[in-house]
Amino acid sequence: MRKLTLAFLVVFTAACTPSGNSPPHTGAAHLAGRIGAAAYTIDVPNDWNGTLFLWSHGYVAPGGELNQAEAGPGGEATAWLANQHYATAGSAYSSTGWALEDAFKDQIDLLDYFSTHVGKPKRVVAWGGSLGGIITAGLVQLNPGRFAAAMPLCGVLSGGIATWNLELDSAYAFKTLLAPGSALQVVHIKDGAANLQLAESIINTVNATAQGRARLALVGGLIDLPGWFDPTKLEPASTNYAAQAQAQATWESRVDFPFAFQYRTELEARAGGNPSWNIGVDYAQMLAASPERDEVTALYKQAGLDLAADLRVLNAGATIKADPAAAAYLQRYITFDGQLTVPVLSVHTTGDGLVIVPNESAYAQVVAAAGKQDLLRQLFVHRAGHCAFTSAEIITALKVLLKRIDTGRWDDAALQPDALNTAAGKLGGDAGKILGFKSDPSFVVYRPALYPRPFAVGSIIPA
Protein backbone atom coordinates (compact mmCIF):
# COMPACT_ATOMS: atom_id res chain seq x y z
CA MET A 1 0.00 0.00 0.00
CA ARG A 2 1.29 3.41 -0.92
CA LYS A 3 2.18 5.42 2.15
CA LEU A 4 0.93 8.96 2.10
CA THR A 5 3.72 11.53 1.94
CA LEU A 6 2.66 14.33 4.21
CA ALA A 7 4.55 17.40 5.34
CA PHE A 8 5.12 17.62 9.08
CA LEU A 9 4.14 13.97 9.49
CA VAL A 10 3.44 13.09 13.10
CA VAL A 11 3.52 9.40 13.98
CA PHE A 12 1.75 8.01 17.01
CA THR A 13 1.69 4.49 18.34
CA ALA A 14 -1.57 4.14 20.23
CA ALA A 15 -2.22 2.16 23.37
CA CYS A 16 -4.41 -0.92 23.19
CA THR A 17 -7.28 0.80 24.99
CA PRO A 18 -8.32 4.38 24.19
CA SER A 19 -7.64 6.69 27.09
CA GLY A 20 -9.16 10.03 28.05
CA ASN A 21 -9.89 12.95 25.76
CA SER A 22 -7.00 14.56 23.94
CA PRO A 23 -7.01 17.75 21.89
CA PRO A 24 -7.75 17.39 18.17
CA HIS A 25 -4.73 17.39 15.87
CA THR A 26 -4.43 20.45 13.68
CA GLY A 27 -1.61 19.20 11.44
CA ALA A 28 -0.96 16.06 9.48
CA ALA A 29 -0.88 12.87 11.51
CA HIS A 30 -0.44 9.14 11.14
CA LEU A 31 -1.71 7.01 14.01
CA ALA A 32 -1.25 3.25 14.20
CA GLY A 33 -1.73 0.69 16.90
CA ARG A 34 -4.30 -1.71 18.28
CA ILE A 35 -7.69 -1.44 19.87
CA GLY A 36 -8.06 -4.75 21.61
CA ALA A 37 -7.01 -7.43 19.10
CA ALA A 38 -7.63 -5.24 16.05
CA ALA A 39 -4.81 -3.29 14.45
CA TYR A 40 -5.79 0.07 12.99
CA THR A 41 -4.33 2.89 10.96
CA ILE A 42 -5.37 6.53 10.64
CA ASP A 43 -4.05 9.15 8.22
CA VAL A 44 -4.93 12.81 8.64
CA PRO A 45 -3.69 15.34 6.07
CA ASN A 46 -2.72 18.92 6.59
CA ASP A 47 -5.77 21.19 6.62
CA TRP A 48 -8.12 18.28 7.25
CA ASN A 49 -11.55 19.26 5.97
CA GLY A 50 -13.45 17.41 8.68
CA THR A 51 -14.60 14.41 6.60
CA LEU A 52 -13.36 10.90 7.45
CA PHE A 53 -13.43 7.95 5.06
CA LEU A 54 -13.64 4.67 6.99
CA TRP A 55 -12.28 1.79 4.88
CA SER A 56 -13.37 -1.84 5.37
CA HIS A 57 -10.97 -4.33 3.79
CA GLY A 58 -11.84 -7.60 2.08
CA TYR A 59 -11.74 -11.26 3.07
CA VAL A 60 -8.61 -12.66 4.71
CA ALA A 61 -8.29 -16.44 4.48
CA PRO A 62 -8.97 -18.12 7.83
CA GLY A 63 -5.95 -19.30 9.70
CA GLY A 64 -3.64 -16.81 8.05
CA GLU A 65 -2.04 -13.82 9.67
CA LEU A 66 -4.23 -10.77 10.08
CA ASN A 67 -3.57 -8.18 7.41
CA GLN A 68 -1.89 -4.97 8.26
CA ALA A 69 -4.55 -2.35 8.75
CA GLU A 70 -5.38 -0.34 5.64
CA ALA A 71 -6.84 3.16 5.44
CA GLY A 72 -7.98 2.67 1.84
CA PRO A 73 -7.55 0.48 -1.24
CA GLY A 74 -4.12 1.93 -1.94
CA GLY A 75 -2.90 3.36 -5.18
CA GLU A 76 -4.03 6.67 -6.61
CA ALA A 77 -7.47 6.60 -4.97
CA THR A 78 -6.14 6.78 -1.42
CA ALA A 79 -3.59 9.44 -2.39
CA TRP A 80 -6.34 11.47 -4.07
CA LEU A 81 -8.34 11.59 -0.84
CA ALA A 82 -5.30 12.84 1.08
CA ASN A 83 -4.60 15.49 -1.54
CA GLN A 84 -8.20 16.66 -1.23
CA HIS A 85 -7.76 16.95 2.56
CA TYR A 86 -9.88 13.96 3.57
CA ALA A 87 -8.83 11.82 6.54
CA THR A 88 -8.80 8.03 6.12
CA ALA A 89 -8.83 5.17 8.59
CA GLY A 90 -9.36 1.43 8.73
CA SER A 91 -9.29 -1.53 11.09
CA ALA A 92 -7.71 -4.92 10.34
CA TYR A 93 -10.51 -6.55 12.42
CA SER A 94 -9.99 -8.91 15.32
CA SER A 95 -10.22 -12.11 13.26
CA THR A 96 -9.91 -13.57 9.79
CA GLY A 97 -12.49 -15.39 7.68
CA TRP A 98 -16.16 -14.36 7.74
CA ALA A 99 -15.29 -11.66 10.25
CA LEU A 100 -18.41 -9.50 10.02
CA GLU A 101 -19.38 -9.65 13.68
CA ASP A 102 -15.91 -8.49 14.71
CA ALA A 103 -15.63 -5.95 11.90
CA PHE A 104 -18.86 -4.16 12.84
CA LYS A 105 -17.59 -3.69 16.39
CA ASP A 106 -13.97 -2.94 15.48
CA GLN A 107 -14.86 -0.25 12.95
CA ILE A 108 -17.17 1.56 15.40
CA ASP A 109 -14.48 1.31 18.08
CA LEU A 110 -12.09 2.93 15.61
CA LEU A 111 -14.55 5.75 14.95
CA ASP A 112 -14.79 6.37 18.68
CA TYR A 113 -11.00 6.32 18.97
CA PHE A 114 -10.67 8.79 16.09
CA SER A 115 -13.12 11.20 17.75
CA THR A 116 -11.15 11.08 20.99
CA HIS A 117 -7.60 11.27 19.62
CA VAL A 118 -7.99 13.27 16.41
CA GLY A 119 -11.30 15.10 16.62
CA LYS A 120 -14.95 14.44 16.00
CA PRO A 121 -15.50 14.30 12.23
CA LYS A 122 -18.12 16.54 10.67
CA ARG A 123 -19.15 13.55 8.60
CA VAL A 124 -18.02 9.95 8.05
CA VAL A 125 -18.21 8.05 4.77
CA ALA A 126 -18.10 4.24 4.93
CA TRP A 127 -16.45 2.47 2.03
CA GLY A 128 -14.91 -0.92 1.40
CA GLY A 129 -14.33 -3.69 -1.11
CA SER A 130 -15.56 -7.30 -1.44
CA LEU A 131 -16.21 -8.55 2.12
CA GLY A 132 -15.55 -4.93 3.02
CA GLY A 133 -18.52 -4.06 0.80
CA ILE A 134 -20.96 -6.09 2.89
CA ILE A 135 -19.34 -4.63 6.01
CA THR A 136 -19.78 -1.12 4.61
CA ALA A 137 -23.47 -1.67 3.87
CA GLY A 138 -23.89 -3.34 7.26
CA LEU A 139 -22.26 -0.46 9.12
CA VAL A 140 -24.72 2.09 7.75
CA GLN A 141 -27.68 -0.21 8.43
CA LEU A 142 -26.65 -0.99 12.00
CA ASN A 143 -25.33 2.49 12.89
CA PRO A 144 -27.32 4.95 10.77
CA GLY A 145 -26.50 7.95 12.91
CA ARG A 146 -22.75 7.56 12.51
CA PHE A 147 -22.43 7.89 8.74
CA ALA A 148 -23.18 10.45 6.03
CA ALA A 149 -22.89 8.07 3.05
CA ALA A 150 -21.49 4.73 1.90
CA MET A 151 -19.70 3.32 -1.14
CA PRO A 152 -19.48 -0.50 -1.30
CA LEU A 153 -17.14 -1.71 -4.05
CA CYS A 154 -17.73 -5.20 -5.50
CA GLY A 155 -19.75 -5.83 -2.34
CA VAL A 156 -21.38 -9.03 -1.09
CA LEU A 157 -24.70 -7.17 -1.07
CA SER A 158 -27.03 -10.17 -1.17
CA GLY A 159 -26.22 -10.73 2.51
CA GLY A 160 -24.77 -13.65 4.42
CA ILE A 161 -27.61 -16.16 4.04
CA ALA A 162 -27.93 -15.75 0.27
CA THR A 163 -24.18 -15.75 -0.34
CA TRP A 164 -23.48 -19.02 1.42
CA ASN A 165 -26.64 -20.66 0.09
CA LEU A 166 -25.43 -19.93 -3.44
CA GLU A 167 -21.97 -21.26 -2.55
CA LEU A 168 -23.70 -24.43 -1.40
CA ASP A 169 -25.62 -24.67 -4.68
CA SER A 170 -22.44 -24.73 -6.75
CA ALA A 171 -20.67 -27.16 -4.43
CA TYR A 172 -23.69 -29.47 -4.30
CA ALA A 173 -24.16 -29.46 -8.08
CA PHE A 174 -20.45 -30.10 -8.62
CA LYS A 175 -20.36 -33.13 -6.35
CA THR A 176 -23.73 -34.53 -7.43
CA LEU A 177 -23.03 -34.38 -11.15
CA LEU A 178 -19.27 -34.83 -11.33
CA ALA A 179 -18.18 -36.80 -8.26
CA PRO A 180 -21.25 -38.46 -6.71
CA GLY A 181 -19.31 -41.36 -5.22
CA SER A 182 -16.44 -39.29 -3.86
CA ALA A 183 -15.69 -38.33 -0.27
CA LEU A 184 -16.08 -34.65 -1.16
CA GLN A 185 -17.98 -32.75 1.56
CA VAL A 186 -20.20 -29.73 0.92
CA VAL A 187 -21.32 -29.01 4.51
CA HIS A 188 -19.95 -30.02 7.92
CA ILE A 189 -16.51 -30.15 6.33
CA LYS A 190 -14.01 -31.81 8.66
CA ASP A 191 -10.69 -31.09 6.94
CA GLY A 192 -10.97 -28.04 4.71
CA ALA A 193 -7.52 -28.26 3.14
CA ALA A 194 -7.94 -31.93 2.19
CA ASN A 195 -11.46 -31.29 0.94
CA LEU A 196 -10.26 -28.50 -1.34
CA GLN A 197 -7.44 -30.67 -2.65
CA LEU A 198 -9.94 -33.37 -3.55
CA ALA A 199 -12.19 -30.85 -5.34
CA GLU A 200 -9.25 -29.55 -7.36
CA SER A 201 -8.26 -33.07 -8.36
CA ILE A 202 -11.80 -33.79 -9.54
CA ILE A 203 -12.12 -30.62 -11.63
CA ASN A 204 -8.78 -31.23 -13.31
CA THR A 205 -9.99 -34.65 -14.38
CA VAL A 206 -13.50 -33.79 -15.52
CA ASN A 207 -12.47 -30.63 -17.38
CA ALA A 208 -10.61 -32.85 -19.86
CA THR A 209 -13.83 -34.29 -21.32
CA ALA A 210 -16.73 -32.75 -23.22
CA GLN A 211 -19.18 -34.26 -20.75
CA GLY A 212 -17.26 -32.86 -17.81
CA ARG A 213 -17.03 -29.39 -19.36
CA ALA A 214 -20.77 -29.36 -20.05
CA ARG A 215 -21.58 -30.26 -16.46
CA LEU A 216 -19.11 -27.68 -15.16
CA ALA A 217 -20.93 -25.13 -17.30
CA LEU A 218 -24.17 -26.13 -15.58
CA VAL A 219 -22.53 -25.68 -12.19
CA GLY A 220 -21.44 -22.19 -13.25
CA GLY A 221 -24.71 -21.36 -14.97
CA LEU A 222 -26.79 -22.07 -11.89
CA ILE A 223 -25.01 -19.30 -10.00
CA ASP A 224 -24.57 -16.89 -12.95
CA LEU A 225 -20.80 -17.34 -13.08
CA PRO A 226 -19.41 -15.07 -15.83
CA GLY A 227 -17.78 -16.53 -18.92
CA TRP A 228 -14.96 -13.99 -18.79
CA PHE A 229 -11.97 -14.31 -16.47
CA ASP A 230 -9.01 -12.19 -17.60
CA PRO A 231 -9.55 -8.40 -17.50
CA THR A 232 -6.60 -7.85 -19.84
CA LYS A 233 -8.30 -9.86 -22.61
CA LEU A 234 -11.46 -9.27 -24.61
CA GLU A 235 -14.71 -10.81 -23.44
CA PRO A 236 -15.53 -14.02 -25.36
CA ALA A 237 -18.20 -13.63 -28.01
CA SER A 238 -21.75 -14.31 -26.87
CA THR A 239 -21.85 -17.61 -28.82
CA ASN A 240 -18.31 -18.75 -28.01
CA TYR A 241 -19.58 -21.24 -25.47
CA ALA A 242 -16.33 -23.19 -25.24
CA ALA A 243 -14.37 -20.09 -24.20
CA GLN A 244 -17.08 -19.06 -21.77
CA ALA A 245 -17.10 -22.51 -20.17
CA GLN A 246 -13.33 -22.47 -19.81
CA ALA A 247 -13.49 -19.08 -18.10
CA GLN A 248 -16.15 -20.39 -15.71
CA ALA A 249 -14.02 -23.44 -14.91
CA THR A 250 -11.11 -21.11 -14.18
CA TRP A 251 -13.23 -19.04 -11.81
CA GLU A 252 -14.31 -22.24 -10.07
CA SER A 253 -10.89 -23.84 -9.69
CA ARG A 254 -8.81 -20.74 -8.95
CA VAL A 255 -11.19 -18.50 -7.02
CA ASP A 256 -14.48 -20.01 -5.86
CA PHE A 257 -13.48 -23.51 -4.76
CA PRO A 258 -11.55 -22.39 -1.66
CA PHE A 259 -14.72 -20.75 -0.32
CA ALA A 260 -17.00 -23.65 -1.26
CA PHE A 261 -14.82 -26.51 -0.10
CA GLN A 262 -12.41 -25.11 2.51
CA TYR A 263 -13.37 -21.75 4.00
CA ARG A 264 -16.88 -22.96 4.83
CA THR A 265 -15.18 -24.82 7.69
CA GLU A 266 -14.33 -21.52 9.38
CA LEU A 267 -17.83 -20.18 8.76
CA GLU A 268 -19.46 -23.22 10.35
CA ALA A 269 -17.17 -23.01 13.37
CA ARG A 270 -18.04 -19.33 13.78
CA ALA A 271 -21.78 -19.86 13.30
CA GLY A 272 -21.96 -23.03 15.39
CA GLY A 273 -23.08 -25.32 12.57
CA ASN A 274 -24.13 -25.32 8.94
CA PRO A 275 -26.10 -22.14 8.08
CA SER A 276 -27.03 -23.14 4.51
CA TRP A 277 -29.74 -25.22 2.88
CA ASN A 278 -31.02 -26.35 -0.51
CA ILE A 279 -34.15 -28.20 0.53
CA GLY A 280 -36.99 -27.09 -1.71
CA VAL A 281 -34.73 -25.49 -4.33
CA ASP A 282 -35.72 -26.05 -7.98
CA TYR A 283 -32.48 -26.15 -9.97
CA ALA A 284 -34.33 -26.42 -13.27
CA GLN A 285 -36.01 -23.13 -12.48
CA MET A 286 -32.67 -21.56 -11.52
CA LEU A 287 -31.15 -22.56 -14.86
CA ALA A 288 -34.19 -21.35 -16.79
CA ALA A 289 -33.65 -17.87 -15.31
CA SER A 290 -29.87 -17.91 -15.82
CA PRO A 291 -28.17 -15.74 -18.47
CA GLU A 292 -25.99 -18.82 -19.16
CA ARG A 293 -28.95 -21.02 -20.09
CA ASP A 294 -28.16 -21.07 -23.84
CA GLU A 295 -24.50 -21.88 -23.20
CA VAL A 296 -25.36 -24.82 -20.94
CA THR A 297 -27.98 -26.14 -23.35
CA ALA A 298 -25.58 -26.00 -26.31
CA LEU A 299 -22.71 -27.69 -24.47
CA TYR A 300 -24.99 -30.46 -23.19
CA LYS A 301 -26.18 -31.09 -26.73
CA GLN A 302 -22.61 -31.22 -28.07
CA ALA A 303 -21.61 -33.65 -25.31
CA GLY A 304 -24.62 -35.91 -25.91
CA LEU A 305 -25.94 -35.46 -22.38
CA ASP A 306 -29.53 -35.21 -21.15
CA LEU A 307 -29.82 -31.84 -19.41
CA ALA A 308 -33.33 -32.47 -18.12
CA ALA A 309 -32.18 -35.73 -16.53
CA ASP A 310 -29.30 -34.01 -14.72
CA LEU A 311 -31.62 -31.32 -13.42
CA ARG A 312 -34.00 -33.99 -12.10
CA VAL A 313 -31.05 -35.59 -10.28
CA LEU A 314 -30.17 -32.26 -8.68
CA ASN A 315 -33.74 -31.62 -7.57
CA ALA A 316 -34.16 -35.13 -6.19
CA GLY A 317 -31.09 -34.80 -3.98
CA ALA A 318 -31.79 -31.29 -2.71
CA THR A 319 -32.34 -32.27 0.91
CA ILE A 320 -29.64 -30.36 2.81
CA LYS A 321 -31.04 -28.57 5.85
CA ALA A 322 -29.54 -25.70 7.81
CA ASP A 323 -28.79 -25.82 11.50
CA PRO A 324 -31.30 -23.17 12.69
CA ALA A 325 -29.02 -21.47 15.19
CA ALA A 326 -26.21 -21.23 12.62
CA ALA A 327 -28.58 -19.80 10.00
CA ALA A 328 -29.84 -17.27 12.52
CA TYR A 329 -26.24 -16.22 13.22
CA LEU A 330 -25.54 -15.68 9.55
CA GLN A 331 -28.77 -13.77 9.18
CA ARG A 332 -27.70 -11.39 11.95
CA TYR A 333 -24.32 -10.85 10.24
CA ILE A 334 -25.99 -9.75 8.03
CA THR A 335 -29.29 -9.64 6.12
CA PHE A 336 -30.17 -6.32 4.54
CA ASP A 337 -33.53 -4.67 5.16
CA GLY A 338 -33.22 -1.87 2.61
CA GLN A 339 -34.00 0.85 5.15
CA LEU A 340 -31.38 3.30 3.96
CA THR A 341 -30.99 6.58 5.81
CA VAL A 342 -27.95 7.89 3.89
CA PRO A 343 -26.99 7.88 0.20
CA VAL A 344 -25.27 4.72 -1.02
CA LEU A 345 -23.31 4.46 -4.27
CA SER A 346 -22.26 0.91 -5.15
CA VAL A 347 -19.80 -0.06 -7.89
CA HIS A 348 -19.40 -3.52 -9.47
CA THR A 349 -17.63 -5.08 -12.44
CA THR A 350 -19.91 -6.97 -14.83
CA GLY A 351 -17.54 -9.96 -15.03
CA ASP A 352 -17.04 -10.72 -11.32
CA GLY A 353 -16.94 -14.45 -10.65
CA LEU A 354 -16.32 -14.29 -6.91
CA VAL A 355 -19.00 -11.78 -5.90
CA ILE A 356 -21.37 -12.11 -8.83
CA VAL A 357 -22.91 -8.92 -10.16
CA PRO A 358 -26.51 -10.02 -9.29
CA ASN A 359 -25.56 -9.10 -5.72
CA GLU A 360 -26.44 -5.60 -6.89
CA SER A 361 -29.95 -6.59 -8.01
CA ALA A 362 -30.50 -8.34 -4.66
CA TYR A 363 -29.59 -5.17 -2.77
CA ALA A 364 -31.61 -2.94 -5.08
CA GLN A 365 -34.61 -5.23 -4.58
CA VAL A 366 -34.73 -4.78 -0.81
CA VAL A 367 -34.01 -1.06 -1.03
CA ALA A 368 -36.89 -0.62 -3.48
CA ALA A 369 -39.19 -2.71 -1.30
CA ALA A 370 -38.40 -0.36 1.59
CA GLY A 371 -39.20 2.67 -0.58
CA LYS A 372 -35.65 4.02 -0.27
CA GLN A 373 -34.55 3.66 -3.89
CA ASP A 374 -33.84 7.38 -4.27
CA LEU A 375 -30.95 6.99 -1.83
CA LEU A 376 -29.30 4.25 -3.91
CA ARG A 377 -27.35 4.53 -7.13
CA GLN A 378 -25.39 1.66 -8.71
CA LEU A 379 -22.51 1.94 -11.18
CA PHE A 380 -21.20 -0.86 -13.38
CA VAL A 381 -17.79 -1.28 -15.02
CA HIS A 382 -17.62 -3.61 -18.01
CA ARG A 383 -14.58 -5.70 -17.10
CA ALA A 384 -13.71 -9.18 -15.93
CA GLY A 385 -12.31 -9.64 -12.46
CA HIS A 386 -13.22 -9.26 -8.82
CA CYS A 387 -12.86 -5.64 -7.69
CA ALA A 388 -11.00 -5.00 -10.96
CA PHE A 389 -11.42 -1.24 -10.96
CA THR A 390 -8.84 1.30 -12.00
CA SER A 391 -8.04 4.03 -9.52
CA ALA A 392 -9.49 6.50 -12.02
CA GLU A 393 -12.84 4.72 -11.89
CA ILE A 394 -12.83 4.67 -8.08
CA ILE A 395 -11.92 8.36 -7.86
CA THR A 396 -14.67 9.23 -10.34
CA ALA A 397 -17.22 7.35 -8.24
CA LEU A 398 -15.94 9.10 -5.09
CA LYS A 399 -16.52 12.48 -6.74
CA VAL A 400 -20.09 11.55 -7.61
CA LEU A 401 -20.81 10.46 -4.04
CA LEU A 402 -19.19 13.55 -2.54
CA LYS A 403 -21.31 15.78 -4.75
CA ARG A 404 -24.40 13.93 -3.55
CA ILE A 405 -23.40 14.56 0.07
CA ASP A 406 -22.63 18.23 -0.57
CA THR A 407 -25.75 19.06 -2.57
CA GLY A 408 -28.29 16.64 -1.12
CA ARG A 409 -29.24 15.25 -4.54
CA TRP A 410 -27.80 12.94 -7.17
CA ASP A 411 -26.36 14.53 -10.30
CA ASP A 412 -28.04 12.20 -12.78
CA ALA A 413 -26.12 13.64 -15.72
CA ALA A 414 -22.80 12.90 -14.00
CA LEU A 415 -23.97 9.32 -13.36
CA GLN A 416 -24.27 8.54 -17.08
CA PRO A 417 -21.52 6.25 -18.43
CA ASP A 418 -20.28 8.76 -21.02
CA ALA A 419 -19.85 11.42 -18.34
CA LEU A 420 -18.21 9.00 -15.95
CA ASN A 421 -15.79 7.70 -18.59
CA THR A 422 -14.87 11.22 -19.66
CA ALA A 423 -14.17 12.22 -16.06
CA ALA A 424 -12.12 9.08 -15.39
CA GLY A 425 -10.20 9.48 -18.63
CA LYS A 426 -8.98 12.92 -17.60
CA LEU A 427 -7.11 11.47 -14.62
CA GLY A 428 -4.71 9.46 -16.80
CA GLY A 429 -1.33 8.13 -15.69
CA ASP A 430 -1.20 5.18 -13.29
CA ALA A 431 -4.78 5.89 -12.24
CA GLY A 432 -5.92 4.34 -15.53
CA LYS A 433 -4.09 1.02 -15.11
CA ILE A 434 -5.35 -2.43 -14.13
CA LEU A 435 -2.85 -5.20 -13.39
CA GLY A 436 -0.16 -2.91 -14.77
CA PHE A 437 -1.94 -2.45 -18.08
CA LYS A 438 -3.54 0.76 -19.35
CA SER A 439 -7.30 0.35 -19.47
CA ASP A 440 -9.85 2.75 -20.86
CA PRO A 441 -12.57 3.78 -18.38
CA SER A 442 -15.37 1.25 -18.81
CA PHE A 443 -18.52 2.44 -17.08
CA VAL A 444 -21.60 1.05 -18.86
CA VAL A 445 -25.37 1.00 -18.63
CA TYR A 446 -26.04 -2.44 -17.19
CA ARG A 447 -28.91 -4.28 -15.60
CA PRO A 448 -27.76 -7.35 -13.69
CA ALA A 449 -29.84 -10.49 -13.66
CA LEU A 450 -31.92 -11.28 -10.61
CA TYR A 451 -30.03 -13.03 -7.85
CA PRO A 452 -30.12 -16.76 -8.76
CA ARG A 453 -31.03 -18.23 -5.41
CA PRO A 454 -34.48 -18.42 -3.87
CA PHE A 455 -34.53 -16.75 -0.44
CA ALA A 456 -31.86 -14.40 -1.77
CA VAL A 457 -32.81 -11.43 0.36
CA GLY A 458 -35.56 -12.72 2.61
CA SER A 459 -35.40 -14.07 6.13
CA ILE A 460 -37.05 -17.44 5.52
CA ILE A 461 -35.15 -20.33 7.07
CA PRO A 462 -36.81 -23.69 6.31
CA ALA A 463 -37.44 -25.99 9.23
Image (tube, helix red, strand yellow):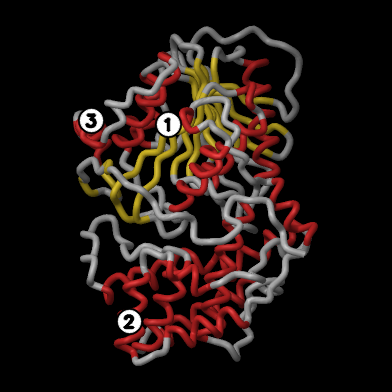
Quarter of the image for residue 97 reads bottom right
Residue at left offset 40%, top offset 40%: 347
Quarter of the picture holding the C terminus: bottom right
Discs 3, 1 touching: Cβ within 8 Å: no
449 in relation to 215, above or below: above
Q: CA distance from mark 3 to mark 1?
A: 31 Å
Q: CA distance from mark 3 to mark 2?
A: 40 Å
Quarter of the image for residue 195 reads bottom right
Q: Residues within 10 Å of mark 1 (few under 14, many from 20)?
A: few
Element under label 2? Answer: helix
Element under label 3? Answer: helix
Which residue has dot 2 on it?
Answer: 299
Which residue has dot 1 on it?
Answer: 3
Q: Residues within 10 Å of mark 2 (few under 14, many from 20)?
A: many
Q: Position of residue 237 (x, y in %)?
A: 21, 66
Amino acid under label 1? Answer: Lys
Q: Position of residue 305 (x, y in %)?
A: 39, 90
